[in-house]
Image (tube, grey):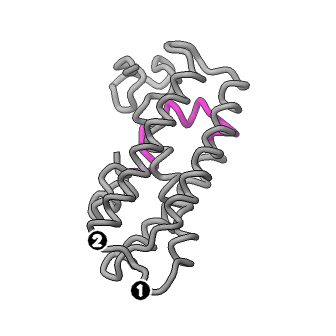
């Protein structure tokens, strides 16, 4: 369900007036960065260049993984968080746990991909950066969910821009 205008960062509402219910866009960003961020470990360890996917194959498979992950996490957020109500600590904890489980499964899928040589350095760099942002985000989510959900700035904006440039458009949404 789309969030109300008051729950969207930058909506002009003072932070206290905005809902702390996470938007689907926020959850999708969490998913995308989580998937991409942790996958760097697997991509660095993938086979030699002879096993590399073509650019088209890599982008198709990577975008499919991200699209499926985003869909699953949207469903999770809708199930865990009730519309227009502040999430309880139990709901936040449940979301964080299931979020991490979901991301781990997707990471395994992405880790099996081997980007083409012409994308490998960019992919490795963005995924390494994404891992750091994801780790900080999950820690912040567990420690102060209200601050995370009401933040004015998107912590994944730079990562999303890099993913978009690579062609992982589903991962950048």
Quadrant for residue 67, please give it. Answer: top left
Give SS at disc 2: helix
In terms of depth relative to the viewer, which is nearer, 67 or 78?
67
Residue 66 located within the stretch drawn in magenta: no
Q: Which residue is mark 1?
A: 49
Q: Nearer the viewer, residue 129 or 52?
A: 52
**In this picture, residue 37 sits left or right of residue 66:** right
Mark with earlier residue (1, 2): 1
Q: Which quadrant would residue 97 be assigned to in this image?
A: top right
Give the image location of residue 138, x and y in percent.
62, 46
Q: Residue at x 50, y 72 (%)?
A: 43
Quadrant of the frame with the C terminus: top left
Residue found 59% across the figure and 29% down from its top: 146
Give the magenta-colored segment's residue range: 141-156
**Residue 80 appears at what percent x and percent y?**
60, 23
Establish if 50 lies above or below 173.
Answer: below
Within 10 angstroms of label 2, few (less than 14), some, or many (20 or more) residues? some
Magenta residue check for 147: yes
Residue named by callout 2: 55
- Which of these two is toward me, 55 or 157? 55
145 left or right, relative to 83: right
Residue at mark 1 to residue at mark 2: CA–CA distance:
13 Å
């Amino acid at each position: 369900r789309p969030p109300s205008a008051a729950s969207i960062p930058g909506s002009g509402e003072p932070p206290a007036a905005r809902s702390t219910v996470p938007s689907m866009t926020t959850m999708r960003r969490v998913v995308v960065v989580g998937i991409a961020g942790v996958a760097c470990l697997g991509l660095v360890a993938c086979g030699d260049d002879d096993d590399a996917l073509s650019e088209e194959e890599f982008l198709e498979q990577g975008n499919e993984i991200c699209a499926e992950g985003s869909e699953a996490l949207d469903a999770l957020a809708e199930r865990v968080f009730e519309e227009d109500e502040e999430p309880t600590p139990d709901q936040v904890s449940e979301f964080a746990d299931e979020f991490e489980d979901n991301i781990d499964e997707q990471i395994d899928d992405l880790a099996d991909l081997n980007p083409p040589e012409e994308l490998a350095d960019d992919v490795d760099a963005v995924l390494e950066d994404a891992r750091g942002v994801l780790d900080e985000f999950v820690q912040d989510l567990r420690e102060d969910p209200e601050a995370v959900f009401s933040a004015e700035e998107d912590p994944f904006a730079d990562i999303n821009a890099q993913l978009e440039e690579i062609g992982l458009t589903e991962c950048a949404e």
